[in-house]
Image: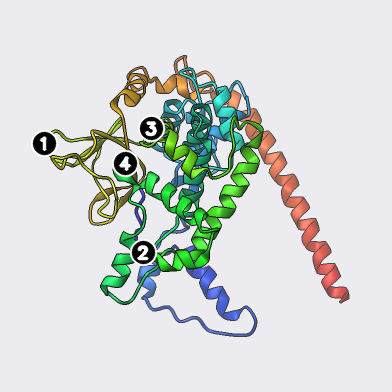
Amino acid sequence: MYSLDVVQISRVQADQRAGRAGRTRPGKCYRLYPISIYQKEFLEATIPEIQRSSLAGSVLYLKSLDLPDINILKFDFLDPPSRESLEDALRQLYLIDAIDENGQITDVGRIMAELPLEPSLSRTLIEANELGCLSQALTVAAVLSAEITFRSTRSKDMEGKRKRQELPDGSGWGDHIQLLQIFESWDRTGYDPRWCSDHELQVRGMKFSKDVRNQLSQIIQKIAKGSTDVQAKKERKSDPDYRKLRRALCVGYGNQLAERMLHHNGYHTVGYRAQLVQVHPFSVLEGDEYGKLPVYVVYHELINTTRPFMRNVCAVDQSWVKPILKKLERLDMNKLSGGSSGSKDPEPLEDKQVSSPKKAMDVKQSDVDSKIQAARERYLARKGKK
């Protein structure tokens, strides 16, 4: 779950910031905390990004290398992430058909690895291409990548609220559909920046989403089965309920499903370690005549503010969810990891086997040290000549 937490800096960061004071001329750095906090509470170094972010893209890249003996859960990372993060990445790739039940990359996974998007959006585009709604999916992927936001207005007058209410409402199907409709409305104005300003949308973010869409259209052109141009009227007439797009989103976000609780509009995530979550208050997802929200939804991300919320949700049909639930039942993490994962863990190497590589490493390290020393001496010699 994504959470934006205020945390203390590390000692490495503190020293780096102090170095700024003397960069161009002599200076002093005043730290607004006692040295005891620096020594006792600060971490030695910043936690590497690989240990605090999603690894689905990285694992997909490793799978695409076609190395037969690679085992993801036992791979020798420089900064090893947690086993749970790696398992979550493998689970996600399996549920969206990027790898098969034996951990081998599929044809779909190879195409996904070529697209500069997170795996869920890549899979959505591929499925949309098969269903005939690629143009719509390209728009949604571009807008989600650009993360368009409303402008922050200082005044709390009704005018600003009215302008936002004039925006498309997603036809009640959810936020992905609303984002599509917003972009299509902007397209009908000839991408007029004033339309964004009139509706309290950040012009810069909208322009960036347009550029991203153009780039994605060029990249996916070689596999596209239809036009990638914005075709709002034609597609809306042929599919008024956006069923094709919503089904593509269900396939792409197979690892990010949530099921509504029986007696209220709370949800629990589907799959490993179910969490109780709620639809974000700003969502345009609508309920039925009794006020009940859809039974199943997909979400773009989970965020934790006052409580866990699903942001950017979209309603999906139960029939689309059943194949994903079946895949969850036969999921085998050891097979998904690859390499010699099907067999038992190998016995630890004996000391005799380890000793020879250790000597080789010592020799190699001494060579590196001698090269560094030689380079230092050359540098000092050049400096002395100047």
- Amino acid, disc 2: Lys
Name the secondary structure under disc 4. Answer: loop
Asked if the residues shown at circle 2 and circle 4 are in contact, with their CB atoms under 8 angstroms apart, the answer is no
- The residue that disc 4 covers is 173
In this rendering, would 181 be left or right of 171? right
Residue holding disc 2: 40
User: Which is more N-terminal, label 4 or label 2?
Assistant: 2
Q: Nearer the viewer, residue 282 or 119?
A: 282
Disc 4 and disc 1: Cα gap in Å?
Answer: 21 Å
Q: Which mark is residue 94?
A: none
> Mark 1 highlights which residue?
263
Q: Are marks 1 and 3 in contact (CB under 8 Å)?
A: no
- In the image, residue 237 lies at what x, y percent? 43, 37
**Which circle's residue, 3 or 2, is located before the other in the chain?**
2
Number of the front mark, 2 or 4: 4
C-alpha separation, residue under disc 2 versus residue under disc 1: 49 Å
